[in-house]
Image (cartoon, rainbow, N blue to C red):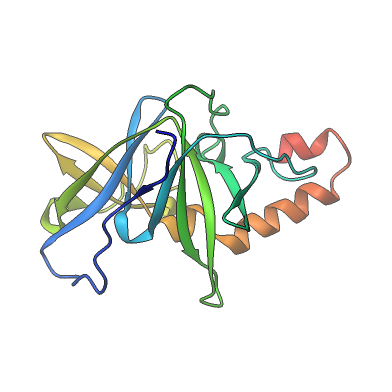
Amino acid sequence: MSQATDLPVVAGQAKTDEEQQYLTFLLSGEMFAIAILNIKEIIEYDNLTEVPMVPDFIRGVINLRGSVVPVVDLSARFGRSRTEVSRRTCIVIIEVRGSDESKQDIGVMVDSVSEVLEIPRSEIEPPPAFGAKIRVDFIHGMGKVAGKFVIILDADKVLSVDELSMLGQAAASLPAGQAEAAA
């Protein structure tokens, strides 16, 4: 997996009851998915440049063809422990929209990438009101696949550029020691 994987992206995909494509991946043994239209590529986990005074879930930045791309540890973003790097650890490059409709690439560190699935809209339930181990606003829906649920994430909310920026500024303004606790 030393090269980037380009994923098929269908421009202007209709939003009817037809099947939507999702990239599935594992985090701490749980299956998650993100709409394929948000995914730009998948790259092998490589050395990151750490950035001081950022929240704990921002692992650092990478140079992606001349652009600086922040890398978010999705497990830590959900309030869990940081992802342990293994040979299957990947960085999924996702394009997210800011509140001003600008687009930015953000890398997401995941345990492993599984597959691209097609899930009909009729097989996607609304997010649960309680019981989820992550914030409900991060969940687009619960997809039913082979009798099991896959948590479909809302990439623009999980990776909100505005919220990540605010959290970074808040952590930078705290005295040393309290910044880690706030993240």
* Quadrant (top left/top right/bottom left/bottom right) for the C terminus: top right
Tell me residue 70's x, y (percent). Answer: 62, 50
The residue nearer to you, when weighing 139 against 131, is: 139
Residue 59 occupies quadrant: top right
What residue is rendered at 62% in x and 40% in y? 57
| Residue 134 vs residue 28, the one in the foreground | 28
Q: Residue at x 72, y 40 (%)?
A: 182
- Is 128 positioned to the left or the right of 98 in the image? left
| 160 displayed left or right of 146 | right
**Residue drawn where x is 16% and y is 50% of the image:** 118
Query: Looking at this rendering, what residue extends furthest in the right direction?
Result: 175
29 and 12: which is toward the camera: 12
Q: Residue at x 54, y 54 (%)?
A: 106
Quadrant into which the N terminus falls: top left
Q: Outermost residue, bottom direction?
A: 100
Label count reads: 0
User: Measured from the top left, where is residue 103 in percent x and y?
Assistant: 52, 69
Observer-nearest residue: 55 or 91? 91
- Residue 21 lies, in percent from the top left, at 22, 54
Q: Is residue 64 above or below residue 113?
A: below
Q: Is residue 7 left or right of residue 57?
A: left
